[in-house]
Image (cartoon, grey):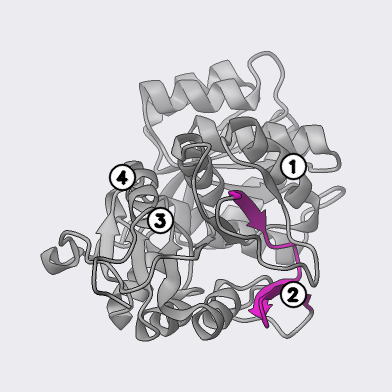
């Protein structure tokens, strides 16, 4: 298998050299070019056609967001951005880059490149450059079937590519969407507040963090409630709880923890949705939801940044329907408004 061809975009010569050294340690990569500004990055991307780009967002002249936008318009290439997230403004800036087309984001080290940071970067770059190619079976695309009881709750899990995917969903949901939505995404503590602010700017419904011990909001009062960074979100006795229980699949919050608790509490009156993401978090929880009679759907491969999480749930047989991202909001809205047919309990 040929090495992945990397273009490094970074204005600091010293940091560029350290990044190149990090990639040189892994034979899976070869650095084909380096750029110190956005204009040069676009030029090299068009000429060299790398497999993946790593890019600092704070560039002289054309900034990283605009560079990302122009690369995706002229020579679409997977881009992994890194930026400091020391304040809310930088967090919003990073989310703008993801919306512009960046595949993933890595927090930039403050002083030096540690071996742990380099290992994480290489892993994320490999994943960005190569996504699974498994095909979704045709039988997973039937017309929806309806449960015996009206839905009470929507639960959503996402990871890599999740911010942009969720933005697309909340932009299209109507203001009178009838159900509360619980969301787990794998986010750092520095990123979580910016995410709420960023989604709120696009959403037609309120967006906020979960409060430990709060009651599940009633139907008819739409709200998107996000798990806190480094805290599991779970449901018990009609309330939402934030816990410090051990990580699941190296994640806290974990999609599995939320989905499994909701399967026990709400069961068949749940709509479960698994979006783009790396790894397998959410697959077992999705299976618990399906066994409880819930309606389960997953984002399809063609619209995922990384098809890992949906694919694992599909392989388990936990997914009833597979949909492109553009169809998920209207599908959820239509399902949420469904009521029992005459004669159903």
341 versus 329 height, above or below? below
Q: Are marks 1 and 3 in contact (CB under 8 Å)?
A: no
Mark 4 or mark 2: which comes first in sequence?
A: 2
Distance of label 4 from label 2 (alpha carbons): 31 Å
90 within the magenta span: no
* Span shown in magenta: 221-243
User: Circle 4 sits on which residue?
Assistant: 327
> Is label 1 in a helix, a strand or a loop?
helix
Mark 1 or mark 2: which comes first in sequence?
A: 1
Distance of label 3 from label 2 (alpha carbons): 24 Å
**How packed is label 4: few (under 14 Cα within 10 Å), some, or many (20 or more)?**
few
User: Circle 2 sits on which residue?
Assistant: 241
Q: Quadrant of residue 45?
A: top left
Q: Are marks 3 and 4 in contact (CB under 8 Å)?
A: no
Mark 1 or mark 4: which comes first in sequence?
A: 1
Along the line of sight, the residue nearer the viewer: 328 or 20: 328
User: Circle 1 sits on which residue?
Assistant: 194
Distance of label 1 from label 4 (alpha carbons): 26 Å
Q: Is residue 326 visible?
A: yes
User: Circle 3 sits on which residue?
Assistant: 336
304 versus 260 height, above or below? above
Q: Is residue 33 visible?
A: no
Mark 1 or mark 3: which comes first in sequence?
A: 1
Q: Does the magenta stretch mainly form a helix, a strand or a loop?
A: strand
Residue lying farthest top?
61
Q: What percent of the width, then of the height, locates residue 288?
A: 43, 84
Specify the quadrant that holds the C terminus.
bottom left
């Amino acid at each position: 298998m040929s090495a992945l061809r990397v273009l490094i975009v970074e204005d600091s010569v010293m940091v560029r050299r350290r990044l190149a050294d990090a990639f040189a340690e892994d034979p899976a990569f070869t650095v084909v070019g380096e750029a110190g500004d956005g204009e040069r990055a676009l030029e090299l991307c068009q000429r060299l056609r790398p497999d993946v780009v790593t890019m600092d967002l704070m560039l002289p002249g054309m900034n990283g967001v605009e560079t990302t936008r122009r690369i995706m318009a002229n020579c679409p290439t997977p881009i992994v951005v890194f930026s400091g997230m020391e304040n809310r403004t930088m967090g919003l800036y990073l989310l703008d880059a993801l919306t512009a087309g960046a595949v993933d984001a890595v927090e930039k080290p403050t002083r030096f490149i540690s071996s742990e940071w380099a290992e994480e970067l290489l892993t994320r770059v490999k994943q960005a450059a190569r996504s699974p190619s498994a095909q979704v079976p045709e039988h997973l695309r039937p017309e929806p079937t309806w449960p015996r009881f009206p839905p009470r709750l929507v639960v959503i899990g996402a990871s890599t590519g999740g911010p942009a995917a969720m933005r697309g969903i909340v932009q299209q949901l109507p203001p009178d969407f009838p159900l509360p939505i619980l969301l787990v995404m794998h986010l750092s503590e520095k990123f979580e507040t910016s995410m709420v602010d960023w989604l709120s700017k696009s959403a037609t419904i309120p967006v906020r963090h979960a409060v430990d011990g709060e009651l599940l909001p009633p139907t008819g009062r739409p709200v998107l409630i996000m798990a806190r960074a480094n805290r599991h979100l779970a449901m018990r006795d009609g309330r939402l709880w934030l816990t410090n229980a051990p990580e699941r699949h190296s994640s806290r919050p974990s999609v599995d923890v939320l989905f499994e608790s909701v399967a026990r509490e709400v069961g068949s009156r749940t709509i479960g949705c698994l979006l783009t993401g790396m790894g397998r978090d959410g697959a077992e929880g999705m299976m618990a939801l399906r066994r409880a009679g819930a309606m389960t759907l997953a984002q399809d491969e063609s619209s995922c940044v990384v098809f890992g999480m949906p694919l694992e749930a599909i392989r388990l047989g936990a997914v009833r329907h597979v949909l492109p991202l553009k169809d998920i909001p209207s599908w959820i809205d239509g399902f949420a408004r469904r009521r029992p047919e005459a004669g159903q309990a």
